[in-house]
Image (cartoon, rainbow, N blue to C red):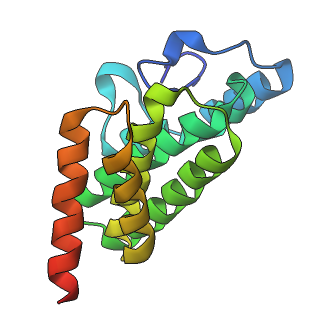
């Protein structure tokens, strides 16, 4: 999060955004003026969460295809909520992340090299949420991906084994 203007994004995407419109820049400045949060070296836990939510707010205004960015942010938020033992918010953001990743999978053109990783993330989120049929389907897609990484294939095989064992 830029402490000056509150533009927020994942670190690997921070400098890849397009210029947002003046109306959105004003909206960010209004948020900055109304909140008492500190970013940068002075960030606290509330500021960290706020940074993720600001990044979710910025994504549709700053990226041409914001869905993948939004999915990644929600997935990271899921893990942060897990680390803070907030299981309700963890599951809520996991479902939002799954829904967004599914949208990407079904509607956005992604390079074949990312397909296996996308399927693995979808499978893991479905598994976390107890959607075992969907998890099995996507773990299987990871496993049979022709050009996929052997490590990811083994991970999918292990998860499929875990699911089968739990269903006995």
User: Can you say whether 14 is above or below 37 in the image?
Assistant: above
The quarter holding residue 78 reads bottom left
User: Can you say whether 137 is above or below 163 in the image?
Assistant: above
User: Can you say whether 45 is above or below 4 in the image?
Assistant: below
Q: How many marks?
A: 0
Closer-to-camera residue (158/76)? 158
Q: Residue at x 85, y 26 (%)?
A: 23
> Looking at the image, can residue 33 be seen?
no
The quarter holding residue 76 reads top left
Image quarter hosting the C terminus: bottom left
Left/right placement of residue 124 relative to residue 166 reads: right
Closer-to-camera residue (50/150)? 150
Q: Residue furthest bottom?
A: 168
Left/right placement of residue 96 relative to residue 85 reads: right
Whole-percent x and y of residue 30? Answer: 71, 33
Q: Residue at x 59, y 46 (%)?
A: 105
Whole-percent x and y of residue 66? Answer: 65, 33
> Looking at the image, can residue 144 be seen?
yes
Closer-to-camera residue (33/27)? 27
User: Can you say whether 32 is above or below 89 in the image?
Assistant: above
Left/right placement of residue 110 relative to residue 164 reads: right
Q: Residue at x 31, y 44 (%)?
A: 45
Whole-percent x and y of residue 59? Answer: 64, 32
Closer-to-camera residue (98/123)? 123
The quarter holding residue 145 reads top left
């Amino acid at each position: 999060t830029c402490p000056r203007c509150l533009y927020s994004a994942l670190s690997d995407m921070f400098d890849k955004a397009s210029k947002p419109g003046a109306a959105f820049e004003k909206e960010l400045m209004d948020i900055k003026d109304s909140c008492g949060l500190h970013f940068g070296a002075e960030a606290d836990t509330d500021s960290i969460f706020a940074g993720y939510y600001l990044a979710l707010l910025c994504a549709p205004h700053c990226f041409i295809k914001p869905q993948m960015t939004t999915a990644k942010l929600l997935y990271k938020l899921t893990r942060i909520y897990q680390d803070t033992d907030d299981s309700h918010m963890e599951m809520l953001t996991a479902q939002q992340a799954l829904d967004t990743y599914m949208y990407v999978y079904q509607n956005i053109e992604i390079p074949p090299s990312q397909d296996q990783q996308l399927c693995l993330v979808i499978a893991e989120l479905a598994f976390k949420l107890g959607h075992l049929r969907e998890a099995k389907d996507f773990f299987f897609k990871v496993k049979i991906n022709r050009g996929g990484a052997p490590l990811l294939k083994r991970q999918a095989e292990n998860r499929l084994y875990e699911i089968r064992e739990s269903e006995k």
